[in-house]
Amino acid sequence: MAADPSPSMHPYLGRGASVGAISTSLLPEDRARFHEALDAARCAGDTEAEQVALERWRGIALLQADPDRYAATVRRIAERKTGRPVPRDEPLSVTRRTAGL
């Protein structure tokens, strides 16, 4: 299993982090998607799916807790998908769409 991106920098986002810690560390535009994923798993009564969703979004929250690192990661993904550089002044929201995030 892969190591957490920055566990020592964000101890509140370690394995078993609370829903609240994860939610507050996400970008505002991702919080609703996070809660929708949890609600869907809970409504299905699927505790394994709920844990998978929590862990997936915890990883995203770890990345987003460091805005510069997150933006650089999104840029690299977009560049790999398109095969061309992302303009430095491009808004993160546009780059995220290009990257499929």
Image (cartoon, rainbow, N blue to C red):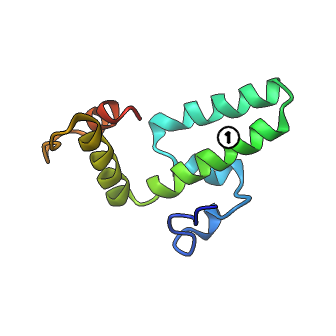
SS at badge 1: helix
Residue 12 versus residue 55 in the image, above or below: below
Name the spot of residue 66 as percent of width and height, x first. Answer: 41, 60
- Seen from the viewer's position, the closer of residues 49 and 83 is 83
Side of 51 where 91 appears, left or right:
left
**Residue 94 point in image, percent of width and height:** 26, 32
Q: Which residue is drawn at 63% across and 54% down?
A: 21
Classify residue 53 as left or right of residue 89: right
Image side of residue 18 versus residue 60, left or right: right
Which residue does the image show at 61% across and 46% down from the upper left?
Answer: 56
- The residue type indicated by label 1 comes to Ala
Taking 35 as reference, is 14 above or below it? below
Q: In which quarter of the image is the C terminus?
A: top left
Q: Where is residue 14 in the image (x, y as percent from the top left)?
A: 65, 64
**What is the number of callouts on the image?**
1
Give the x, y percent position of residue 100: 38, 31
Q: Which residue in the protein does label 1 denote?
A: 53
Query: Relative to 70, is 49 on the left or the right?
Result: right
Residue at 55% of width from left, 68% of height from top? 10
The residue drawn where x is 29% and y is 54% is 72
Is the residue marked by circle 1 packed among few (<14), some (14-19), or many (20+) residues within 10 Å?
A: some
Report the quarter where the N terminus lies: bottom right
